[in-house]
Image: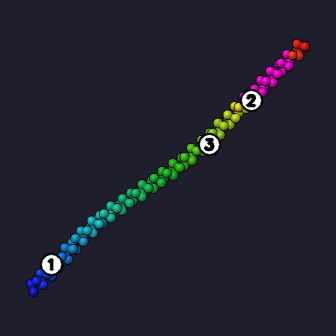
């Protein structure tokens, strides 16, 4: 009978030790879960910040591209006007030269 009581006492002691071990493990898991939740929240905040920064950079890029396109158009217009001015000046010069030559020839005759 003593063996039965000792076995029963050993089973009870094992169950108590298991309960203490399980409680300790649950405490550790709760701490780990809290750390994981905190880290997850921080990652979400960082992700949101990165997305906001990406959106801002995209808007800035669009503004810069639009500005470059406008300035490119203005430069092309200025270049066209300069070419047209040079061409007009050449035409005027040659017309003047021809006029002077024709007038000079008429005067000699």
| Figure check: 67 above or below 2 | above
Gap in angstroms between the C-alphas marked 2 and 1: 112 Å
Residue 69 bears which disc, if any? 3
Around disc 1, counting alpha carbons within 10 Å, would you say few (fewer than 14), some (14 to 19), or many (20 or more)?
Answer: few
- Residue extending farthest to the top is 108
Residue 100 belongs to the span the image colors magenta: yes
In primary-sequence order, the first of circles 3 and 2 is 3
**Position of 5 compared to 92: left or right?**
left
- x and y, in percent, of residue 78 in the image: 67, 34
| Figure check: 46 above or below 104 | below
Gap in angstroms between the C-alphas marked 1 and 3: 86 Å
Q: CB of mark 1 within 8 Å of CB of mark 3?
A: no
Select label 1 or label 3 by which is in front: 1
| Figure check: 102 above or below 53 | above
- Residue extending farthest to the bottom is 1
The magenta stretch is 86-104
Around disc 3, counting alpha carbons within 10 Å, would you say few (fewer than 14), some (14 to 19), or many (20 or more)?
Answer: few
Q: CB of mark 2 within 8 Å of CB of mark 1?
A: no
At a point 64% along the width and 36% down the height, the residue shown is 75
In primary-sequence order, the first of circles 2 and 1 is 1
Select label 3 or label 2 by which is in front: 2
Identify the element where label 2 is drawn.
helix
| Figure check: 28 above or below 55 | below
Quarter-of-image position of residue 28 = bottom left
At a point 65% along the width and 40% down the height, the residue shown is 73
Q: Check disc 1 and report the residue beneath it.
A: 10
């Amino acid at each position: 009978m003593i063996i039965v009581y000792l076995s029963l006492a050993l089973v009870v002691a094992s169950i108590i030790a298991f309960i203490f071990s399980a409680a300790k493990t649950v405490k550790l898991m709760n701490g780990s879960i809290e750390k994981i939740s905190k880290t997850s929240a921080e990652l979400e905040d960082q992700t949101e910040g990165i997305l906001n920064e990406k959106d801002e950079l995209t808007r800035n890029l669009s503004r810069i591209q639009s500005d470059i396109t406008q300035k490119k158009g203005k430069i092309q217009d200025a270049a066209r006007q300069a070419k047209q001015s040079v061409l007009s000046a050449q035409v005027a010069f040659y017309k003047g030269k021809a006029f002077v030559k024709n007038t000079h020839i008429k005067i000699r005759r």
